[in-house]
Amino acid sequence: MHYTVLAGGTGAAKFLLGLTQVVPQEQIHVVVNVGDDAEVWGLHVSPDIDTVLYALSNRLDMARGWGLPDETFRCLQEIGRYGMPTWFRLGDADLATHLSRTEMLRRLPLSAVTAKLAESMGVRASVFPATNDRLRTRIETPDGLLDFQEFFVRDRCRPEVLSVLYSGVPDAQALDAAVHSIREAQLVILAPSNPITSIGPILAAHGMRDALRCTRAEVVAVSPIVGDKAVSGPAGKLMEASGFDVTPAGVARCYHDFLDNLVVHASDAAVAPDIRNDTIGVQVTNILMTSPEDARRLAQFVVDENRTAPR
Ligand code: FO1
């Protein structure tokens, strides 16, 4: 009996914290985006995995949405003297995670490294990278291809986006444990994450969409779009560049081949008929998470509205 959440980015972390107040953490499986991963100072950084692990071990800096609280940046200051890039700010305590992951990756796949880090942090949920293979989001701009973090952090999402690509596809294989988790889930939830660069790379791993189409569980997504805007981040710009309307209906289209239900904000109730025409159910509630109580209530709503009889 488990609930499988597809997650990436800060909206997912808030939702997951809400879900931990609704079901036991042991019953939560998280399939995490690796498209944002990057090599920084020779270290393998997995931002979305770290955000999930830090959130589930109650150590995420919620104000920043990434990294650890009370962080210091002594190494960052010093390494800048050697001409190393400092636009991607790695904190001193956060560095311990990247150093440990990089060292363990010399002998183990990312899934095993993630399980070891989760265990060390006391995380009781099961946390799976979408794939152990290299799969990276690239942003095509008029000045050429950018890695995701170059676009998102260095250039602050300013460049014009011509398209979004996932390098490593179609060779990157969905992690077997993630496929199994989806197929055997009580309920599959797509967290309110960016459909293009947080959920998209998960779906791009070979075998992931099949698992979502074949699972007997209901598959429900929480819209990251309210009205015609993203709740946070560049989802709107990236959806537009990928040919999707920046609306809840556009989100439904991103997931049309496997989604059963879409949870939309109260103010978007009027769009329900359009989405239902796409044979996707619509559930309406307040989806803004401005407090842990909001997140708990949203998670409770998603579980209650989509619970099917325990198998
Ligand atoms: N985001 C920023 O806006 N600026 C940063 O300097 C930055 C550093 C960073 C370091 C480690 C890490 O795990 C995440 C970091 N992030 C930073 C956030 C990161 O870009 C995002 O969490 C995801 O890639 C987008 O979901």
Image (tube, rainbow, N blue to C red):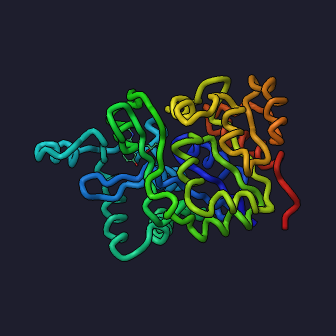
Q: Nearer the viewer, residue 296 or 9?
A: 9
Q: Residue, x 86% and y 56% (percent of image)?
A: 308
Outermost residue on the bottom side: it is 107
**Count of all numbered marks drawn on residues in the image:** 0
Q: Nearer the viewer, residue 175 or 71?
A: 175
Quadrant where the N terminus is found in the figure: bottom right
Q: Position of residue 24 (x, y in %)?
A: 69, 59
Q: Nearer the viewer, residue 208 or 87?
A: 208
Q: Determine whether, in the image, residue 289 is placed left or right of residue 98.
A: right
- In the image, residue 60 sits, relative to residue 108, either above or below, namely above
Q: Residue, x 31% and y 42% (percent of image)?
A: 88
Q: Quadrant of residue 242?
A: top right
Q: Position of residue 241 (x, y in %)?
A: 52, 32
- In the image, residue 155 sits, relative to residue 109, either above or below, namely above
Q: Position of residue 252 (x, y in %)?
A: 71, 39
Q: Determine whether, in the image, residue 192 is placed left or right of residue 185.
A: left
- In the image, residue 104 sits, relative to residue 191, either above or below, namely below
- In the image, residue 162 sits, relative to residue 188, either above or below, namely above
Q: Position of residue 118 (x, y in %)?
A: 49, 64
Quadrant where the C terminus is found in the figure: bottom right
* Image quadrant, ligand 1: top left
Q: Quadrant of residue 152?
A: top left
Q: Determine whether, in the image, residue 281 is placed left or right of residue 291.
A: right
Q: Residue, x 83% and y 53% (percent of image)?
A: 307
Residue 115 visible here: yes
Outermost residue on the left side: it is 82
Residue 124 visible here: no
Q: Quadrant of residue 30?
A: bottom right
Q: Residue, x 31% and y 47% (percent of image)?
A: 91
